[in-house]
Amino acid sequence: MFKLKFMAVAAVMACGISAPAFAQGDGQLDEIRKQIEQLKTEYNKQIEALEKRLKDAEQAAATAKEAATTAKETAAKAQTTAAAASQQVPPPSQARPNAFNPAISLILMGTYGNFKNDPTQYGITGFQPPGATSPGDRGFHLGESELFISANADQMFSGAINLAVTDEGVSAEEAYFQTLALGHGLNLKGGRFFSAIGYQNAIHAHAWDFADTSLVQRAFLGDNYGDDGVQLTWVAPLPLFVEVGGELGRGRGLVGNFDLGSGGELSSNDRNKNGAGAWSAFLHVGGDVGESNSYRVGLSHLSTSTGTNSFSLADFDTRSSAASTFTNGQVKLYGADFVWKWAPQGNYQYTTFKFIAEWFQIRRDGDLTFDPGGPGELTDRFTQKQSGWYAQAVYQFRTYWRVGLRYDQLQSGSFDGGMNAANLAVADYTPKRVSAMLDWSPSEFSRIRLQYNEDKSLQSLTDHQVLLQYILSLGTHGAHKF
């Protein structure tokens, strides 16, 4: 480039020399040559300077590229080291003082009850005798408060405890651990917990849609059936929600049987044996239907036995005042449940609708003794089947406000008493109940509910029940299940 410029300058200079110039002396020519040499020298210096700048720039770029590559490699090594370090659990002596920060919540519940009939004499004809279960207390009643504490113990386990505070004292409703990292859709729970059979059973009272539980739940399982044992669940890797689970438990309470004056607690069934005294299995299938609907269908089974323990046969004697007991028995419970939820475009804040239906059947097989210790004592094998169902719908018609309707019904079922068939008979009655409720929730932490029940659980009696309930949630509380 500089040579071309030099030649151009030389040409211009040559053209600028007039003919008379050739006649000039050698001194002037020398001057011209000198100027040309100076120009060549200056151009050479400029070329050298530019070539040096180019070389320096190339070296700087190479240095920067090398530094960037080194930094990238260093960052990758640091990330790998951090990931490896996160998989290591520091020894207890190195744990921080605030490493454990449990979530703590307190649920406060209270009720005002107005009952036409004495609730202490409440019963379900053909299922539970008067005084075995109760729909509540007359007047103001504190009810059950719950203290719930949960936290992760480490990268493998979490733990939780739910303490129920009542007039009778403090008891551990649930106290269990769960795994966090089994993988492959598996989860293991152990300790004391509410069983996952059915839909309503695993839900705590403060999260119910009505102030009380369904009749079939009350007759067979009480408010919540829980046991001491282990539970294993598996969520299948499918686009549809599929959960399969099973439980092994102590069998500390006999399903379908309640002691008089127990406040609705299942009869104790401690058999002082090794191994499991009860087991259950369940299947849940669900998913979304469009953007606004979702559902879940469930099947469940629970099995336990009496061993040599003896139990009263739950208000089954309808022909005489003689008592009846059964022992050496198997008790099996079968269930099916269905839940459908709707919220426009999946937005649950303003308008929602929820429909729930459950059905249970209980089957007892064992030795039945009529009039034990009396003149008519007679023992023989028996088989009994009883069932019940309910359906309820809850509609949130505007923010904070919901209305709900529920219908309950029980069927006395069938009975084969062998030689005791002449002494005992199935009650010719169908217990039923209709409930309506209205609740107001100014926030997710409080709720006021008004409920009315027309209860026909006892034959020849209709109980009109009015319940006014408050529920307050204080502190951090985890989300409830679907």
Image: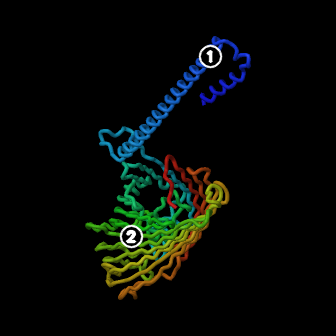
Query: Which residue lies at the image location 32% right of the left edge and 65% below the top edge?
Result: 250
Question: In terms of sequence position, does the residue under pointer 2 or pointer 1 come before the other?
Answer: 1
Query: Which residue lies at the image location 64% right of the left edge and 60% below the top edge?
Result: 345
From the image, which quarter does the N terminus lie in?
A: top right
Q: Position of residue 241 (x, y in %)?
A: 49, 66
Q: Is residue 80 visible?
A: yes
Where residue 259 sits, quadrant-wise, is: bottom left
Where residue 374 sits, quadrant-wise, is: bottom left
Circle 2 crowding by C-alpha within 10 Å: few under 14, some 14–19, many from 20:
many
Check if mark 2's residue and mark 1's residue have beta carbons within 8 Å. no
Where residue 283 sits, quadrant-wise, is: bottom left
Seen from the viewer's position, the closer of residues 414 and 67 is: 67
Q: Amino acid at mark 2?
A: Ser
Up-down relation of residue 61 to residue 457 (above or below): above
Left or right of residue 346: residue 307: left
Q: Amino acid at mark 1?
A: Gln
Q: Is residue 99 visible?
A: no
Badge 1 element? helix
Q: Position of residue 72 (x, y in %)?
A: 44, 40
Residue occupied by mark 1: 35
**Which numbered marker is on residue 430?**
none
Query: Which residue lies at the image location 37% right of the left edge and 77% below the top edge?
Result: 323
Left or right of residue 181: residue 123: right
Residue occupied by mark 2: 280
